[in-house]
C-alpha cells in the first residue's frame, strides 16, 4: 500500500493551509460584524463566480477560478484580524513573516523536496501519474519532431488524460494533420501483462513499468516503444483507426458529472463492438474497458436498472473469445462470471488460466474464495 500523504504540499486547494486558516478567520470576523458589512456582497459575488461549476459537470478549478478574488478578500480580512490581535510591537513584523511562510509552503507544494515532511515521505518521481512518467520516457522522440503512433488509451479506465493531450502534436493516431505513412515508431501505455505478448509480436520493442507508491515499485501499467516497419505498419494503422473511437468514449466519460451513472457509456460500448477489428490486442483492450465500466456501474450504481448482464455478457464473451486470453485476462473474466452466478463457465475460464500458470497459489485461492473448488 502507498504510504500516507501527510506533507504540507498535499494540503489545500486554491489556498495552502496557512492562507486557508486566514480565510476561515475572515469568515468569522465578517459574520460577527455589526452594522454595515461587506459579507452579503462578497457572498453573492462568490455564489455568482461558482455558477459555471453548478451549471456544468463539476467544480474543476478552471470552471470556478473566478471566485479566487473573493476568497482573497476574505483571507486578507482574516490576516488583518490576526495582526490586530497581537501586541502592537509584533503587528508590524507579523504580516511580512506570515507572507514569507505562506510563499514558502506554496513553493514546496509546487516543487516538493525528494523526501521528508514536505513530500509526504515519498520521492517526487514516484508521485507522478502514469501519463507523466510515460511522457518523460517518450519525450526524446518528440524532440526530434518526428511524429509517431501514440496509443494512450489501451487501458481499462480513463483516470489520466494527460498523455493523450500532451502528445497530440506528435500523435499520428489522433492528429489528422499528421501523415499516417512514413511513421517509424509507436508508443503505447497499457496493462503490464500484455508486454510479453506484444514483445513477441513486435521484435525490438522496449518496455518500462510505471512506478506507483514507493520508489521502485512497479504498478499495473507499462509503457512501450514499438518499432514500425514495412511489415507491421498496417497493424498500427488499424490501431490508429480504432484509437479515434476509444478517444470518443473516453471524452464522454471525462465529461460525465460526478456521480452520474455510466449506463449510456455501456450502451455505446456495446453498440461499438461490431466495429472492433479482429486484432487480439484491440479485442483484449475492448474487453477490459467494457468489463471495467460494467463493474463500475454494478459497484457504484446498483440502483441503475439499465446495467443488464444479459445485454452486456454476449459482447464480453465475444471480445474475450478473440482476445489474447492470457492468465490475467482469464482471471478477470472468471471472477466476473463467478460474481454473476455463471459458476460452471467461470470454472472453465479459471482452468484455462491454470494451464498457463500451473499450480498458481493465488488463482487456486481465488477459486476457493469464489466457490469454484480447486
Image (spheres, rainbow, N blue to C red):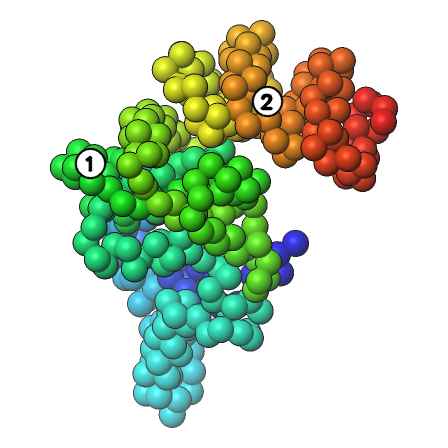
Label 1 packing within 10 angstroms: few (<14), some (14-19), many (20+): few
Q: Are marks 1 and 2 in contact (CB under 8 Å)?
A: no
Q: Residue at x 21, y 57 (%)?
A: 144
What residue do we see at 31% from left, 67% from top?
Answer: 76
Query: Residue 276: x percent and y percent?
Result: 40, 19
SS at badge 2: helix
Side of 50 relative to 195 (left or right): left
- Dot 1 corresponds to which residue? 181
Element on which disc 1 rests: loop
Q: Nearer the viewer, residue 61 or 32?
A: 61
Report crowding for label 2: few under 14, some 14 to 19, many 20 or more residues within 10 A (C-alpha).
some
Q: Is residue 348 above or below residue 222?
A: above
- Frontmost of labels 1 and 2 is 1
Depth check, front residue: 166 or 200:
200
Residue plotted at (42% across, 48% down): 204
Residue 222 x/y as whole percent: 49, 47
Give how far apart the Cα atoms at labels 1 and 2 are. 43 Å
Residue 191 in percent (x, y) is at 52, 40
Relative to residue 229, is residue 334 depicted above or below?
A: above
Of 152 and 114, nearer the camera is 152
Q: Earlier in the sequence, mark 1 or mark 2?
A: 1
**Between 157 and 300, the one nearer to me in the picture:** 157
Q: Visible in this render: residue 297? A: no
The image's mark for residue 113 is: none
**Residue farthest to the left?**
177
Residue of label 2: 298
Amino acid at each position: 500500500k502507498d504510504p500516507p500523504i501527510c506533507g504540507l504540499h498535499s494540503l489545500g486547494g486554491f489556498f495552502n493551509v496557512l492562507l486557508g486558516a486566514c480565510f476561515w478567520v475572515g469568515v468569522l470576523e465578517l459574520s460577527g460584524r455589526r452594522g454595515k458589512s461587506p459579507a452579503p456582497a462578497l457572498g453573492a459575488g462568490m455564489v455568482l463566480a461558482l455558477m459555471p461549476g453548478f451549471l456544468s459537470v463539476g467544480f474543476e478549478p478552471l470552471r470556478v477560478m473566478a471566485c479566487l478574488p473573493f476568497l482573497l478578500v476574505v483571507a486578507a480580512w482574516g490576516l488583518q484580524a490576526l495582526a490586530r490581535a497581537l501586541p502592537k510591537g509584533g503587528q508590524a513584523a507579523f504580516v511580512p513573516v506570515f507572507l514569507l511562510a505562506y510563499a514558502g509552503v506554496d513553493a514546496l507544494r509546487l516543487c516538493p523536496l525528494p523526501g521528508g515532511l514536505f513530500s509526504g515521505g515519498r520521492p517526487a518521481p514516484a508521485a507522478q501519474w502514469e501519463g507523466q512518467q510515460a511522457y518523460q520516457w517518450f519525450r526524446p522522440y518528440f524532440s526530434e519532431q518526428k511524429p509517431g503512433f501514440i496509443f494512450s488509451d489501451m487501458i481499462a479506465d480513463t483516470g489520466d488524460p494527460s498523455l493523450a493531450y500532451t502528445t497530440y502534436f506528435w500523435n499520428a493516431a489522433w492528429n489528422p494533420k499528421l501523415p499516417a505513412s512514413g511513421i517509424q515508431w509507436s508508443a503505447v501505455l497499457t496493462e503490464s501483462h500484455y508486454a510479453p505478448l506484444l514483445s513477441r509480436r513486435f521484435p525490438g520493442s522496449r518496455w518500462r513499468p510505471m512506478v506507483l507508491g514507493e520508489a521502485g515499485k512497479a504498478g499495473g501499467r507499462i509503457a512501450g516503444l514499438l518499432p514500425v516497419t514495412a511489415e507491421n505498419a498496417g497493424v498500427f494503422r488499424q490501431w490508429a483507426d480504432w484509437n479515434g473511437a476509444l478517444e470518443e468514449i473516453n471524452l464522454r466519460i471525462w465529461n460525465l458529472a460526478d456521480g452520474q451513472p455510466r449506463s449510456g457509456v455501456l450502451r455505446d460500448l456495446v453498440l461499438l463492438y461490431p466495429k472492433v477489428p479482429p486484432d487480439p490486442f484491440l479485442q483484449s483492450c475492448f474487453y477490459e474497458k467494457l468489463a471495467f465500466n460494467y463493474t463500475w456501474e454494478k459497484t457504484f450504481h446498483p440502483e441503475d436498472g439499465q446495467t443488464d448482464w444479459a445485454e452486456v455478457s454476449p459482447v464480453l464473451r465475444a471480445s474475450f473469445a478473440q482476445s489474447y486470453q492470457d492468465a490475467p485476462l482469464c482471471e478477470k473474466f472468471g471472477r466476473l462470471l463467478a460474481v454473476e452466478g455463471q459458476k460452471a463457465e467461470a470454472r472453465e475460464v479459471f482452468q484455462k488460466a491454470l494451464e498457463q500458470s500451473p499450480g498458481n497459489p493465488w488463482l487456486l485461492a481465488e477459486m476457493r474464495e469464489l466457490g469454484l473448488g480447486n
